[in-house]
Image: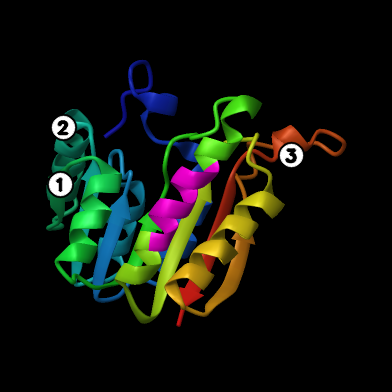
Amino acid sequence: LVEPLHGQKTGLYLDQRQNRLLTSQFARGRCLDVFSYQGGFGLHMKMKGAEEVTLVDQSDKALELAQIAARLNQLRINTVAANAFDFLKEQQTCGERYDVIVLDPPAFAKNRATIESASRGYKEINLRAMRLLNPGGILVTSSCSYHMHADRFESLLLSASKDTNRRVQILERRGQAWDHPEKLGFPESRYLKCNILRVI
């Protein structure tokens, strides 16, 4: 269900559509879609056979639309309206474990002045996700801020992996969909970084 005139980024975040399709190929067991909005990643994973899918977002309206879309596709999903940072912390405290976790947050770095604080935020959610994954689990993690360059994003992922004592393999480095083109000589046009990782 899409609200092109009122939804965020036309209501569907079309720049992630190819990444959703690829992510669904890893769907298995318990899957968590954090900052899910209307559940683009989570619904794809459920359609591909994930046993349990939970969407986490602060927007009750977005989660309501996700549930309607799930019912229309004869899917059963869980939804949690919560602050993602708090939710991930609580899940870790409770000893929960997942097989696939997707992190697709809004742009934490709105400008260059906020890069340091944004880096701390990105590191925290990725660190907690790594701790929540079963061995061999898949982490799909994104940053849509063009101020957060790819090398810096991978550096904070490395720092998170060291802090969790987990080995992490990069399966794919991806960006925005083809109709959101990247222009040579204009690095800011590569605004979306989407890394598919295996956490061991």
Between the C-alphas of marks 2 and 3, the distance is 33 Å
The residue closer to the viewer here, 37 or 163, is: 163
Q: Circle 1 sits on which residue?
A: 80
Measured from the top left, where is residue 125 in percent x and y?
A: 39, 53
Q: Residues within 10 Å of mark 3 (few under 14, many from 20)?
A: some
Q: Circle 3 sits on which residue?
A: 182
Measured from the top left, where is residue 163 in percent x and y?
A: 47, 69
Among numbered discs 1 and 2, the one appearing first in the sequence: 2
Going by the numbered disc 2, the residue's amino acid type is Asp
Going by the numbered disc 1, the residue's amino acid type is Val
Is 114 placed above or below 174 here? above
The residue closer to the viewer here, 126 or 171, is: 126
Kind of element beneath mark 2: helix
Q: Where does the magenta region start and end? A: 119-127
**Residue 153 visible in rendering:** yes
Magenta-colored segment: predominant secondary structure: helix
Left or right of 120: which side holds 44?
left
Q: Is residue 120 magenta?
A: yes
Q: Are marks 1 and 3 in contact (CB under 8 Å)?
A: no
Quadrant position of residue 121? top left
Q: Circle 2 sits on which residue?
A: 60
Between the C-alphas of marks 1 and 3, the distance is 35 Å
Left or right of 177: which side holds 46?
left
Measured from the top left, where is residue 124 in percent x and y?
A: 41, 53
Measured from the top left, where is residue 103 in percent x and y?
A: 40, 52
Kind of element beneath mark 3: loop
Going by the numbered disc 3, the residue's amino acid type is Glu
State the mark number for residue 133: none
Q: Are marks 1 and 2 in contact (CB under 8 Å)?
A: no
Q: How is the image coloured?
A: rainbow
Is 5 placed above or below 136 here? above
Give the residue at x 69% y 40%: 190
